[in-house]
Image (cartoon, rainbow, N blue to C red):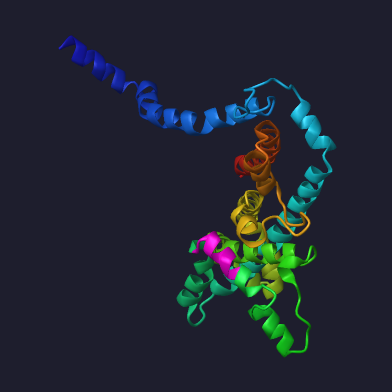
Amino acid sequence: MAPERSHQQLLDNDAIAAWLFLTPALLVLGIFLLFPIAYLFYLSFTTGSFTTAGVRWLGFNNYLRLLLNPDFWQVLGNTVYFTIATVIPSLVIPLGLATLLNRSIAWRGLLRSAYFLPSIVSIVAAGLGFRWLFQTDGPVNTWLNAIGISPIPWLGSSIWAMPVLILLSIWKQLGFNMVVFLAGLQAIPPSRYEAAELDGANAWQQFWHITLPGLRPTLIFATITTAIFTLRGFEQVYVVTGGGPLNSTNILVYYIYQEAFGQFDFGYAAAAATVLLLVALFLVYIQLRTWDEE
């Protein structure tokens, strides 16, 4: 009876009981998340663990190579361009759609489902579809030719290839952000709009002074998640352009893949991945700070 009573006393202690329930999840998190991150950081200071000579300590040489490598700076510029050009439309368009679909209009449920559909389509399938649409003799150029515009080598041009990837990423993110904004809009009390109407505020004034301030946490959340989704973009580059032409669509995740599994330069790839991880952690930090302020 004494051991059973002792066990019961342990379970009655809230702190001990909480740790007992959390331990399995913490073990899984440590093995499959924290350990790989720590090992990635370690690899960034070495030659990598898959070379014939084995692991060799290099210190900050891999990071120095990053700073001195013009290809890395081109890829970083591509990533910034790709991220900004994707995030802004991926917020503006879904916000407009959510504002419209939050009202009582015909076929509202059907339209919501239709706009959300891209979010559940495989990015690989969507990439193959966009590759077919924008190939030189594809439907897009056929439509352009029908209205008197010369065909554009979308995927073979260093100018037009990136906009195709941006369009694909916007299309993929559209439905998720729209649902997020719809949830945020429905959390704004209707009484605020009623009071604004009584004061003579028009639709634009209501949107600017009620909707946007009320959506501030939602906007920040959507911005952070869209930026992270864009920064980890790999499949669309791999399927549609392969990083070309002339490295014009090579972004950071695909560059890491090329260096690790194309050049087998795992230490250098780990250094680049660490840079990407730091950017993602900074975005998460901004999100957490925003929640604390709320």
Residue appearing at x 78%, y 56% in the figure: 246
Which image quarter is the C terminus in?
top right
Which image quarter is the N terminus in?
top left
Instruction: From this view, report whether residue 250 is shown above or below residue 283.
Output: below
Instruction: From this view, report whether residue 167 is shown above or below residue 293.
Output: below
Q: Quadrant of residue 21?
A: top left
Q: Quadrant of residue 100?
A: bottom right
Whether residue 188 is in magenta: the answer is no
Foreground pick, 110 / 191: 110
Instruction: From this view, report whether residue 231 is shown above or below residue 202.
Output: above
Q: Position of residue 256 (x, y in %)?
A: 67, 42
Please state if 271 lies on the left or on the right of 158 as rendered. left
Whether residue 125 is in magenta: the answer is yes
Please state if 6 lies on the left or on the right of 179 as rendered. left
Q: Position of residue 273 (x, y in %)?
A: 66, 38
Outermost left residue: 1
Q: Position of residue 193 (x, y in %)?
A: 60, 68
* Residue 201 at least partly seen: no
* Residue 272 at least partly seen: yes
Residue appearing at x 76%, y 48% in the figure: 75
Outermost front residue: 52
Foreground pick, 134 / 9: 134
Count all numbered tags in the image, as a single digit.
0
Q: Position of residue 133 (x, y in %)?
A: 63, 74
Magenta stretch, main secondary structure class: helix
Foreground pick, 9 / 53: 53
- Read off the magenta span: 121-130
Q: Quadrant of residue 126?
A: bottom right
Residue appearing at x 73%, y 62% in the figure: 162
Foreground pick, 271 / 262: 262
